[in-house]
Amino acid sequence: MPGTRGFSVVPRRWVVERTFSWISRNRRMSKDYERKVQTSETLIQVAMVHLLLARAGRVH
């Protein structure tokens, strides 16, 4: 937080960290190999679509 010294808890930071974890499960997204930003953005979208389709396929 701006103006805060030392450690401060950022609310709902775990949501961002969890999403990064899901994205990095894809082998190609584990490191930054791409030359163009647009390619990286597209691969992130593909990774998230893959995650959503995998979840939609589960029937409880």
Image: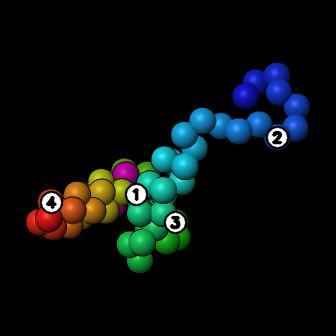
Q: Earlier in the sequence, mark 3 or mark 1?
A: 3
Give the labeled residue for mark 4.
56
Q: Which residue is mark 2?
A: 7
Q: In the rendered image of this protein, does residue 20 appear above or below residue 10?
A: below
Estimate the spatial distance between the alpha carbons at disc 3 and disc 1, rounded to whole Å.
Answer: 8 Å
Amino acid, disc 4: Ala
Q: Is label 4 in a helix, a strand or a loop? A: helix
Foreground: 21 or 32?
Answer: 21
Q: Are marks 3 and 1 in contact (CB under 8 Å)?
A: yes
Cα distance, mark 4 to mark 2? 39 Å
First-in-chain label (4 vs 1): 1
Q: Is residue 33 above or below residue 20?
A: below
Residue 9's spot in the image, x, y percent?
71, 39
Front one among 28 and 48: 48
Looking at the figure, which quarter contains the C terminus?
bottom left
Q: Residue, x 41% and y 63% (percent of image)? A: 22
Task: Give the residue displayed 50% in from the left and 48% down from the top.
Answer: 16
Q: Which corner quadrant of the image does residue 2 belong to?
A: top right
Of residues 60 and 4, which is closer to you in this image?
60
| Residue under numbered circle 1 | 40
Residue type at the position of mark 1: Ser
**Residue shown at the point (88%, 31%) measured from the top left:** 5
Q: Amino acid at mark 2?
A: Phe
Q: Secondary structure at mark 3?
A: loop
